[in-house]
Amino acid sequence: MRARGDALRRFAYLLCGDRHLGEDLVQEVLIKAYRRWSRIEADDPDAYLRTALVRSHVSWLRRRSSGERPRWETTGDEGRSTPDFADQHASRDDLWARLDGLTRAQRAVLVLRYYEDLDDRQIAEVLRCAMSTVRVHAARGLARLRTELATASGGSR
């Protein structure tokens, strides 16, 4: 955990889209892995933990009691920054909102592909599915993101 904790938390954050849920996910997976750590450590612990995080996230039954997510909003001019900073945050928030619209499997595939830089074979191993399933999830997820971006671009003109 000392060596890879930050990387695991960042990875879980990208899967969940929420820092606190990501930390909970990492904690849950590490608790389960602790019991078998001597066996896991002998193999490839990074691959095992990454697989466990993705599989736990995709099948996670625990939900928040409500679907609300707190947003920090300011009133008036306090807390305003330069337009570049605001534009960056608006773009980031827009991206998170669009990623939240994907299924868990689609999001996991896109995070594994573009954040972890894994190929289809490696993603299939992590998700324990066929490479064709990985390609389907990636294609559908990207198609949905493209459609939403095209709609947003066309609607803002």
Image (cartoon, rainbow, N blue to C red):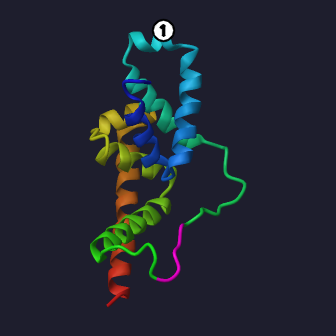
Report the number of numbered marks.
Answer: 1
Residue 74 falls within the magenta-colored stretch: yes
Q: Is residue 96 left or right of residue 87?
A: right
Q: Nearer the viewer, residue 102 or 23?
A: 23
What span is colored magenta in the figure? 72-76
- Kindly give the residue lying farthest to the front in the view shown: 78
Amino acid at circle 1: Ser
Q: Nearer the viewer, residue 90 or 121?
A: 90
Location of the C terminus (image quadrant): bottom left
User: Where residue 56 appears, x then y in whole percent?
Assistant: 55, 36
Q: Is residue 68 left or right of residue 78?
A: right
Location of the N terminus (image quadrant): top left
Q: Residue at x 53, y 40 (%)?
A: 23
Q: Is residue 20 left or right of residue 107?
A: right
Q: Residue at x 56, y 46 (%)?
A: 21
Q: Quadrant of residue 96?
A: bottom left
Q: Nearer the viewer, residue 83 or 156?
A: 83
Q: Quadrant of residue 9?
A: top left
Could you classify mark 1 by the number of other residues whose Cα lies within 10 Å: few (under 14), some (14-19), or many (20 or more)?
few
Tell me if residue 56 can be seen: no
User: Where residue 66 appears, x then y in whole percent?
Assistant: 70, 59
Q: Residue at x 44, y 81 (%)?
A: 77
Q: Residue at x 38, y 28 (%)?
A: 4
Q: Circle 1 is placed at which residue position?
A: 38
Which is the main secondary structure of the residues drawn in magenta? loop
Reply above or below: 29 against 42: below
Residue 104 falls within the magenta-colored stretch: no
User: Where residue 140 appears, x then y in whole percent?
Assistant: 40, 59
